[in-house]
């Protein structure tokens, strides 16, 4: 039984080159180089290493999901996998994550059901090319800085990036405030707001920078925890006009 990487690569190659050329490829890399198919086969696998380019809107959204609830793991022989953990409470989010992953990378996307969540996954040797933030340790334990090409994409597709971050580590909720009245009674005021929580100050900074680009007002504070590296950075969006602006392109999870 062949690995998923080999099966996907063979299928992709057969779609791009004549059958006789595809057949020669199975006799070894030597023949592939001779007929020039090695470069052709690589194209669909890495939109960074080839000339095909990224689906930038889908990538901005997937980047937000990755920074919140994603990671890249190793399988073997240089093959890795991207995994995005999605809560089963929001099946629409799982479907949207699956579609975005398939748009970013022409790979087979599959799901693994866990207790309370579903991992949306795809394998490739090139996920670290697409997400250079990958590295040893947890994301909040190392610097998270966007590459220039990533920053350009986020600046041009800021809405999908913010949406991905909210869909991973954010929520739209109703805030309730109790206010005492002069006659001794109590009035409860309810209003919607968005909240984003992440223990990485770098990721929280990327989120607030994106909000600034969209001219969306926000407030932030740090929730102190033990140990200190687990302090939570909480960003709230509660002004009526800011919430309405977020509703235009984010909305509640579903």
Image: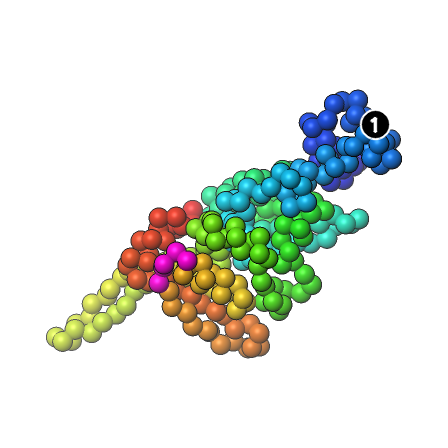
Dot 1, crowdedness within 10 Å: few (<14), some or many (≥20)? some
Q: Does 35 lie within the magenta span? A: no
Where is residue 15 shown, x and y percent of the image?
Answer: 69, 27
Q: Quadrant of residue 110?
A: top right
The mark total stands at 1
For the point 33% across and 56% down, the residue is 243
Give 214 or 92, whichever is nearer the viewer.
214
| Label 1: element kind | helix
Image check: 172 left or right of 48?
Answer: left
Taking 202 as reference, is 73 above or below it? Answer: above
> If the image is split into quadrants, where does the N terminus sit?
top right
Identify the residue under disc 1.
24
Secondary structure predominantly adopted by residues drawn in magenta: loop
Give 157 or 248, whichever is nearer the viewer.
157
Image check: 1 left or right of 47?
Answer: right
For the point 51% across and 41% down, the residue is 95
Taking 144 as reference, is 181 above or below it? Answer: below
Q: Does 214 lie within the magenta span? A: yes
Residue 11 is at least partly visible in this image: no
Q: Which span is picked out in magenta? A: 213-217
Taking 155 as reference, is 104 above or below it? Answer: above
Image check: 92 left or right of 52?
Answer: left
Where is residue 36 shown, x and y percent of the image?
Answer: 78, 32
Where is residue 138 shown, x and y percent of the image?
Answer: 63, 64
């Amino acid at each position: 039984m062949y690995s998923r990487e080999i099966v996907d690569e063979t299928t992709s190659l057969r779609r791009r080159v004549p059958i006789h050329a595809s057949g020669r490829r199975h006799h070894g890399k030597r023949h592939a180089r001779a007929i020039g198919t090695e470069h052709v086969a690589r194209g669909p696998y890495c939109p960074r290493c080839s000339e095909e380019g990224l689906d930038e809107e889908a990538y901005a959204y997937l980047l937000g999901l990755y920074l919140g609830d994603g990671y890249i793991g190793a399988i073997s022989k240089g093959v890795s996998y991207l995994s995005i953990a999605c809560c089963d409470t929001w099946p629409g989010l799982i479907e949207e994550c699956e579609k975005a992953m398939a748009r970013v990378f022409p790979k087979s996307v599959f799901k693994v059901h866990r207790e309370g969540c579903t991992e949306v996954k795809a394998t490739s040797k090139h996920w670290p090319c697409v997400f250079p933030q990958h590295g040893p340790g947890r994301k909040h334990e190392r610097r998270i800085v966007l590459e220039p090409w990533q920053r350009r994409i986020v600046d041009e597709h800021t809405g999908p990036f913010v949406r991905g971050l909210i869909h991973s580590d954010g929520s739209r909720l109703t805030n309730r405030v109790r206010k005492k009245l002069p006659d001794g009674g109590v009035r409860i005021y309810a209003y919607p707001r968005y909240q984003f929580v992440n223990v990485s100050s770098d990721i929280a900074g990327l989120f607030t920078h994106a909000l600034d680009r969209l001219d969306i007002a926000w407030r932030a504070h740090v929730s102190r925890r033990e140990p200190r590296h687990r302090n939570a950075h909480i960003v709230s969006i509660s002004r009526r006009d800011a919430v309405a602006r977020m509703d235009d392109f984010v909305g509640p999870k579903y």
